[in-house]
Amino acid sequence: MQDQNMLKQNHTVLVIGGGVAGIRAAMDLAESKRDVVLIDKAYSIGGLMTQLDRTFPTNNCDLCTLSPNLSESGRQLHIELMAMTQVAEVQGEAGNFKLKLITEPRFIDLEKCTACGDCFNKYPECVRFTPGLDHRAPTCMRYPQAIPHAFSIDIEKCKDIDGLVKVCKADAILPEDTQKVQEVDVGAIVLAPGAEVFDPGKLDSLGYATNPDVVTSLEYERILSASGPTQGELVRPSDGKQPDKIAWIQCVGSRSLHEGAASYCSSACCMFALKEAIVTKERFQDSIETAIFYMDMRTFGKDYELYLNRAKNDFDIRLSRSRPHSVLRNPETASLSITYTPDDSNTNVTEDFDMVVLSTGFKVSQDVQDLAVKLGIELNEHHFAKTDSFSPVATSKSGIYVCGMFESPKDIPETMVQASAAAFCASKDLSVTAELSESVEEFPPERDVSQEPLRIGVFVCDCGLNIGGVIDAKGLADYAGTLPDVIVSEMIGHGCSRESLVHIENTIIEKNLNRVVIGGCSPRTHETKFQDALRRAGLNKYLVEIANIRDQDTWVHFDHPDDAFIKAKELIRMATISVALSRPLTDNIFPMNKDVLVVGGGVTGMNAALGMADMGFKVYLAERSGELGGVAKKIHKTIEGDDVQAYVKDLINKTMQHDRIEVINNAFIVDHTGMPGMFKTGFQIAPQMFYRQIEHGVTILATGALPNKPEEYLLGEHKNVMTQLDMDAMIENHPDEIKGLTNIVMIQCVGSRCPENPNCSRICCQSAIKNALRIRELNSTAKIFILYRDMRTYGFYEDYYKKARELGVIFVRYGADEPPEVQAVGEQLKVTFYDSILRRNVSVYSDCLCLSTGLIADEESSEDLGRIFHIPKTIDNYFLEDHIKLRPIDLSVPGFFVAGTAHAPKTIRECIAQAQAAASRAHSMLGRDTLNLGAAIARVEGEKCAACLICVRACPFSIPFINEDGYSEIDPAKCHGCGICAAVCPAKAIQLMQYEDDQIMAKLTGLLERVN
Amino acid sequence: MPGEPIIIEAKKKSDFLDKVKELLPEGGNLNLCLTCGACSSGCPATGLEDMDPRKFLRMAALGMDEEILSTPWVWMCTMCQRCIYVCPMKIDIPQLVYNARASWPREERPKGIRGSCDMALRNDSCSAMGTAEDDFRFVVEDVLEEYQEAQPEFKEMQAPIDKQGAEFFLNQNSREPVTEPDELVPLWKILHLAGVDWTYGSKGWAAENYCMFLADDQAWEHITRTSAKQADDLGCKTFLNTE
């Protein structure tokens, strides 16, 4: 019977919500060969992030960061994308959910729409558009690269439907379109519906409803955004002038008991206010005054403290710890007046600003709460999906997982972590049958073009207005037609649309083309699409060259169209000359070794190992010490009250007993070679230090961090001075001693946020509060003082902060330049601190001083491992991920993933989520049976090589060696394709395939033709 | 580090704060302060007597009862409630201030407020200016007559006192009948034009209640009850408080 059940199990996952979380989850699932239905109620995917201008901490353009993911998700064969779609009904259970989905009418045929913009230009009121302050600007696309790349019609607003139908040259308007209902069967569900922002209209003292120059942070992003209503000009709404002075007010709708507000912390607002202030200065004018009014500056994420320091020191952003009472329009100057009490003062200051930005927090929308009822999942008191401390992405209902904002308010990197974690859990549920539907595109055999004369086809995109709105795309195609060997040259609208790609294929075949140039956008996002078109037409995929007219020309020179046209011609000429020299290349494909190496046997490492082993992979779990468990072995309770010891014990048992996990204790890594899918790592194993080498396909680093023990405040000298970990043990093992205490003082940020350890340790605020609450349970009369710099109880930890205050714990803020002083007075400790509200010193005679010492990177191990594995580190010695925003788990060396406190300090719950996420990323990589290293590898021409050893020394991966024949040899299976050897070789004996010297030189010649 | 430090040794209880907490629903949220300063930034009394609402609450939390029960700042608070209106934790600072006032010996409370309260206790007018019932009646009738004559369009206007069964019971700040009688008229005109059925009371007509500001609970209650009883006796349905 059971077998039958398994056969009946469905292998599709429904992902609800197409923001960054949903896209990441869908892509992880698709790469692990699960079929995905991705639905979003909006008419294009992308969610909130596509409305932002730039993201912290790199201040990169959001869309540039996100669009490769967006276009990849639109391209993935395993993903079926359904916009404007919501769940109507849900039945069944894990493994067999039956859902009814309702798709609202778009009134546009997605297959035909080329997003040319004709409908919008003629009938702007008929086109749906939501983001922003101005509902019509500038293109009515949610963002320029919208997926699906099509408009959506609001038929009710359209007065001239016949006219609208006629204006569309593609015949894509469907005035009779109706709502569609369809049923889908899925095995698991991933919820990524996101959050909405708080509406500050009700808080009348802040004047949002009455003053146009008071905007929300999201509206401010729209003002900064190039695709926003002001096209990236910073102007204030009331009079269109550039503001000279801008204020941010934090915690609007968060950390508040006001009606409609959230009592939790929204977690991301401090960072985005800092970012908005920095970007304002960076992009517009350094002289613009920026002030942020805050309660606690919560820069608790990885390297966020450094960002805060940059904001203060390099950008001169004023941070004022005070909450203004109200924002009033100054009748004389028309500016906005803010009165506030500066910290350490009781004289009010009134200051005028040109604009005020309200940092509004996040909440779960009513729609999503209704969805939760349909799905039958429990919500917490704040209406977020309820999850467990030790299974952070599992909802109360089996088979349904949650990630991103709906789990708790959070920023993008943490959303990405949870998205991968949720994808992994969903994948794991469906892992019973290994053979899954495989939809690989079949290509015809490649034509041999080596003896053919050059026949180049040029296709120029107008990309809607992106190119065609700036330059004459048809004229550019005509020009390209005059270049040597060009047989066909055409303007093709959106080259990446399905119709255009078919046209390109047919043209290649009809005209017998053997080289193709696309005048379009970025090869980074779109090259694969055109390569596939060539393959379908029987050409080798490396015979195409893309001239990036959009990014490199029409976007950047939109205000100089004549010059832009000249530059476009140059770009096309370079591409045409270069493509003439391109040669068919073969990708280097190797079989994948599917074994996994997990380094580090703490909670993170064990979770990652168990995850991969349960999926059927062989796992080597290498632990440096003699036993599993890590730092968690020293912790008894989580702040939520869960029993950590029982959890760790259970985890160790499961790990030790798992058939597919081999635990290697006392293991020191000493060497490492290879490529993803074919790594070799060598260990020395204590105590005999014998050597062992294992082969594996991927590596997960979960090496953890160390509890910090700085020599401060008499720690280690006085018996009543201890760390929070010591306090945790004392509460557990000696409750009677706790009952006898009268005055307890805790000091935060000891050994964190200081020059020696510049970042925030993230966990200490909540652990101090956790211990204070546990002390309070045992001892209701003791006075407890927590001396802090900023209370960083992000998300729902704010509830516990409030609880502690309710129970009379006294919180006193101290400045970094004025730390508390501690003096031993016999058994007691005299703790003296300055209270900036009283503006007086306070001395507490304490019988217990508890220091929140946080975590510090394990410098020794990260130093060794970083060197052996070639992995970069942050300045405070944590491993540095590939992209701090969108790839927080992938390391820059392919095949390596990081999780847990080796990445940055985090709680157990967050470690578990990241372990699952690392497993997901590893699983995605191992979803392939072969490893395609592409064609870009270095090749040596032996007769030119002088064996000078320069390449041997220059290669960061130590791949070249001098072989028996006396010249440099580079193993294609090991080469990373970085090109350094090719650049340094004095004899020009090394060529990087796909980027050979003659191609590069030809491009330059083409560019400089006129000069010559 | 400035000043003499505050010393906190063995168990020192903040009696005052705890006492006030017991009086208020949810304890007035008095423990929840985030020290954000929203209260003090909107307080007209911030900076007076080196005090502000945040500091006042802080001192209460640290058990500095002696200081907070003796600072004259509590008498500078206008009871406007701007602080609690914006406080993210909805902390009832005005109640804390009120109870601090109540702890003062009556004779030491500010003379002006105390005198006004005492005046109101002199007769049933409850007027802080001590105006007698007859004087009020005389002024109202006199002014009404004058306007009825001078402005024929308001010939029918009324300003009744003790009109049985009127819909609205209206009270009146004493300052107008005593020092600016003409200022009574605009409101009468509005009520007249709106066709409202209203009345003053001969007892409890005075709208101000300095006994409340004095934190003299008994006297405050007496004055409020006098006014309310008159409205009830007249059978009025709505009490229009003009203060």
Image (cartoon, rainbow, N blue to C red):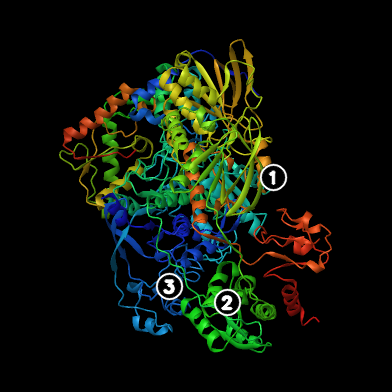
Of labels 1 and 2, the one closer to you = 1
Q: Residues within 10 Å of mark 2 (few under 14, many from 20)?
A: many
Say which residue label 3 marks. A151
What residue appears at the point 69 percent right and 70 percent down from the top-left corner? Answer: A995
Query: Marks 2 and 3, Cα distance to the nearest angstrom?
Result: 18 Å
Q: Position of residue A741 (x, y in %)?
A: 49, 15
Mark 3 residue type: Phe
Say which residue label 2 marks. A467
Q: Position of residue A566 (x, y in %)?
A: 68, 81
Say which residue label 1 marks. A867
Q: Residues within 10 Å of mark 3 (few under 14, many from 20)?
A: many
Q: Is residue A546 left or right of residue B97?
A: right
Q: Position of residue A630 (x, y in %)?
A: 54, 32
Instruction: Label 1, secondary structure: give it.
Output: helix
Query: Marks 1 and 2, Cα distance to the nearest angstrom?
Result: 46 Å
Q: Total of numbered circles in the picture?
A: 3
Quarter holding the N terminus of chain B is top right
Asked if the residues shown at circle 3 and circle 1 are in contact, with their CB atoms under 8 angstroms apart, the answer is no
Of labels 3 and 1, the one closer to you = 1
Of A596 and B18, which appears nearest the observer? Answer: A596
Mark 2 residue type: Ile
Camera sees residue A287: yes
Indicate which disc residue A2 carries: none
- Give me the chain letter of mark 1: A
